[in-house]
Image (spheres, rainbow, N blue to C red):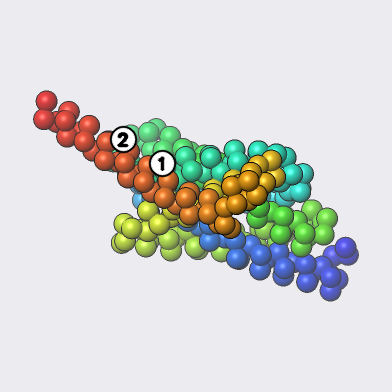
Amino acid sequence: MEFGSTAFWIALLQIVWIDLLLSGDNAIVIALACRNLPDSQRRLGIFWGVFAAVALRVVLTAFAVQLLEIPYLKTFGGLLLIWIGVKLVMPQAEEEGHEIEAKDKLWAAVKTIVIADFAMSLDNVIAVAGAAKGSFFLLVFGLALSIPLVVWGSKIVLALMNRFSWIVVAGGGLLGYLAGEMIQTDPGIRDFWNVSLALPPHALAWIGVVIVIAVGKWLTWRQQKGRQDAAGA
């Protein structure tokens, strides 16, 4: 595909539009992972989280079709996403720390973003790869344009989370939904879910929502109860 041609610009617009539609998930994950960072660390967390997520998506897109056809990989990714969702639903203890501890928290947040984006991107990158039509340059350029959109979205979600605590739970539930969809469409076991068990479409997605929120709330209750017991002892 020739640079600057009509086909090039059409493909570029398609990639930007696709990424606009898919950036909401990334913005929520980044906001969830960075919500407990000190104010001085949040911008860095968002920047490196977005940078790592976009770079990872570029790499995954090159192997998108092959990755999605590997049996049980989507199930693994879905289970990983459920675990991340549960951890993000649970409130993090506020710790007073030094600069070294703050850096540790920053990179822990970035690591969470990368792992979650890897799990979620297995489906999303196929659309981007199809629009790029084999042009790696077009792929990288198109995804790079999406960075301000994800950053902007992450900052808005962060601001809303600070005002409305229920958004954190809703974000965790979204990860559970995506996890369930991935598991139900895994080529290795989708016949088991959809034929043998005859589950309706998106059934595991809604089950994933319940699991993430219920387990997250239960672990939070246990955590708080343990602290109360320790304080009363």
What amino acid type should be assigned to the residue bearing mark 2? Answer: Gly
Instruction: Judge by depth and name the residue closer to the eye, 171 or 145.
Output: 171
- Which residue is label 2 attached to? 97
Name which of mark 1 and mark 2 comes first in the sequence: 1
- Residue lying furthest bottom: 6
Secondary structure type for disc 1: helix
- Which residue is label 1 attached to? 87
Q: Residue at x 31, y 41 (%)?
A: 218
- From this viewpoint, is residue 186 visible? no
Name the spot of residue 11 as percent of width and height, x first: 78, 67
Quadrant (top left, top right, bottom left, bottom right) of the C terminus: top left
Image: 33 above or below 141? above
**42 left or right of 140 in image:** left
Instruction: Judge by depth and name the residue closer to the eye, 222 or 26.
Output: 222
Name the spot of residue 215 as percent of width and height, x first: 37, 42
Quadrant (top left, top right, bottom left, bottom right) of the N terminus: bottom right
Image: 110 above or below 131? above
Image: 167 above or below 78? below
Q: Residue at x 67, y 58 (%)?
A: 143
